[in-house]
Image (cartoon, helix red, strand yellow):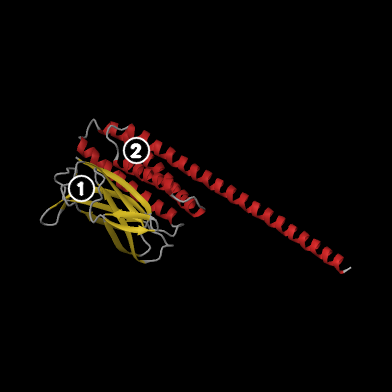
Amino acid sequence: MESNKSSMGLKVALGIALVLFLGTAFYTMNLYKESNDTRKQLTEEKQLVMNDLNAMAKQYDEAISENEIANADLVEARARIQGLIDSLKISETNVKSLWRYKSKYLALQKEMDVLLAQNDSLRVENSYLATSLDSTRVRLEERTVFTDSLLVQNTALAEVMENAAVLSTVGLKGFGVIERTTGKLIPTERARRTDKIRVCFTVAKNKLVQAGDQELYVQVIDPKNNTLGLNEQVQFGEKTLNYSIVSKFNYENSNLNICEFVTSKSEFEKGRYVVNVFNEKDLVSSTEFTLK
């Protein structure tokens, strides 16, 4: 009798264990499937953002190719998009990362609408001005119009970026300067006359970023792929960043204009220079310029 009770208890225990095992296996399989589905969906979303950025880059390429003299603001905007594409390719595929890139894409989309509209307007205007004005006066008027346009774009971009608690920059420019003994700086495109590289940008207003001392890493790469300036390294997890200078500033939750100088241990080379600004390991803006 006791043997039958023991056998019956064992069967019941085995039955319960089997049910628990099957339940655990089913729950694990569901979790695995949901994880794969989420990963697939994030990958698809990342590809959609990549497609949108590539389409935007193509529109800039078409606008630039329509002008005999490429507009500097269009070229600069195109370079920033390429920098964002390169950054997206190596970024982690998660909700936070995709949300940040989508926010940047929306900001760039607004900027592009303004830039292309201005570009079309100026192209028509120049056809009339060319008959009565010399090329120097035309270029000066173009610079005035685009400077006003850039201020509007920076304000719009700053409002969009307020949703993310990270520092971002707009209006990044790099160019060579001649430094007089009086301290006066004169922009130049000639490599042999360049004393320093001047890098200027605006740190965008972001109410979610804590006010106080902040820093960004500036990287200037010459035509031979050398990092100019300090050329020191900083480690962020598994990523190593070579930087030219650390831009340190006091951030007060408002737009802040910053300019830094980068030197070279030898004469500046002729060719294409790339300027990148990093917030720790994240690339936040990029541009390029040429010294002849």
Give x and y (percent) for residue 22.
Answer: 71, 55
The extreme right residue here reads 1
Give x and y (percent) for residue 282.
Answer: 39, 54
Q: Does the CB distance between marks 1 and 2 fall below 8 Å?
A: no
Picture quarter with the C terminus: top left
User: Mark 1 sits on what residue?
Assistant: 176
The residue lying at 41 percent from left, 44 percent from top is: 85
94 displayed left or right of 68:
right
Whether residue 255 appears in this view of the structure is no
Whether residue 127 appears in this view of the structure is yes
Disc 1: CA contacts within 10 A as few (<14), some (14-19) or many (>=20): many
Residue 170 higher or lower than 68, as above or below: below
Q: In front here: 20 or 97?
A: 20
User: Mark 2 sits on what residue?
Assistant: 119
Task: Look at label 1 and name its amino acid.
Answer: Gly
Give x and y (percent) for residue 34.
Answer: 61, 51
Q: In front here: 286 or 4?
A: 4
At numbered mark 1, what does the secondary structure look like: helix, strand or loop?
Answer: strand
Instruction: Say which label, 1 or 2, has the lower sequence index.
Output: 2
133 displayed left or right of 154:
left
The residue lying at 24 percent from left, 32 percent from top is: 130
Task: Look at label 2 and name its amino acid.
Answer: Asn
